[in-house]
Image (cartoon, rainbow, N blue to C red):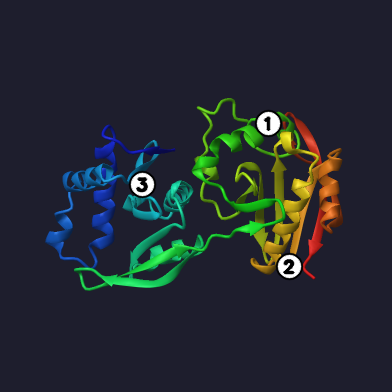
Amino acid sequence: MIVPVDRTNLYEAAAVHAAAWRDSHRAFCAPAFVDAHTTERQANYLCRKLDAGSRLFLLIEEKPLGVVSVTEDLIEDLYVLPEEQGKGYGTKLLRYALGVSTGTPVLWILENNTRARKLYERLGFAETGNRHSVPNGLDEIEFALQTPRMETERLILDRVKETDKADYFNNISHDRKVLETFVCRYAESLETFDFSTYLGRDDLFAIRLKDTGKLIGIILYFDEKDGVCEIGYGVGSAHWGKGYATEAVRRFLTYLFEEKGMKTVCASYFTGNDASRRVMEKCGMTYSRFSPQEFEYLGAMRDLTYYAIERS
């Protein structure tokens, strides 16, 4: 769970920040300087950031584990407790920060922080060429997110953002007609809808109407291995019958082949879902295989039919 930081949980966030900061800086900073970064000192630092308009977020899994700050498009203070690193918590926090940032997300890292560099590059960040020196004699390097953005005649495909929560809820997670054929957990109410798992992901894209920018559906790829992946897509039932899914899938296939380097892309549909089958066929996909009783969904074992297309 990721929650906003305010005055009620500021000290918890500061404790995580202090412990992780000391661990990450001990190798190249003077011991006295490192030890001076106490919880109290970092609490004052985080308090000043809140007062200046930054948004802080705390990752909690039974106990506080990580923290991050977002100031418009600038992501800072991404720290995870030393003993909890290597478990995906940093990635989860960063993806959340991407979803709540505005504009093109940017961040700065110390030039010798190879672990952070690998994380950020894996999630689509690249050096901008900007750098500046800091007091410890090292340079900080600026990274910016290389955000995929695809357009069609009527649609835009891009990353899911914090502001999409209500549209995602209405068109996907609370739309029972969609969930009959698109595998997703049902959300009962907007207030209890955990949207954090969908933010900042590099494999999940919003399908938006170009004229309004509103999210009407989603499209994603998964199970990528050796140049082969599977895609899934869903469009809110209020927007069915207008060709949006076909338009989005066609553009998405081009992205996967030309920009992601995929060799083969497949997709599947539940037996009886002829609308999804027609989308696949219109996009040039052909029958691959039938998989009976592949898994249970909504209380019944489901047959799946797979279609595929190869890069030409």
Report if residue 5 is visible in the image. yes
Q: How far apart are marks 1 and 3 (CA)?
A: 33 Å
Tell me the tag on residue 164: none
57 above or below 289? Answer: above
Position of residue 14 relative to residue 136, above or below, is: above
| Residue occupying image coordinates x 33% and y 71% | 131
Q: Is residue 67 left or right of residue 127?
A: left
The answer to which image quadrant residue 21 occupies is: bottom left
Mark 1 vs mark 2: which is more N-terminal?
1
Q: Closer to the observer: label 1 or label 3?
A: 1
Residue 175's label in the rendered image is 1
Q: Name the residue under label 2.
A: 263
- Tell me which residue sits at (53%, 43%) in the image: 197
Q: Name the quarter where the C terminus is drawn.
A: bottom right
User: Badge 3: how crowded within 10 Å, few (<14), some, or many (20+)?
Assistant: many
Coordinates of residue 103 in the picture (x, y in percent): 46, 54
Q: Marks 1 and 2: which is nearer the front? A: 1
Q: Horizontally, is 181 left or right of 209 in the view?
A: right
Residue type, label 2: Lys
Which of these two is toward me, 179 or 224? 179
* Residue on which the image places disc 3: 66
Whether label 1 touches label 2, CB < 8 Å: no
Q: Which residue is drawn at 39% across and 37% down?
A: 3
Looking at the picture, which amino acid does disc 1 mark? Asp
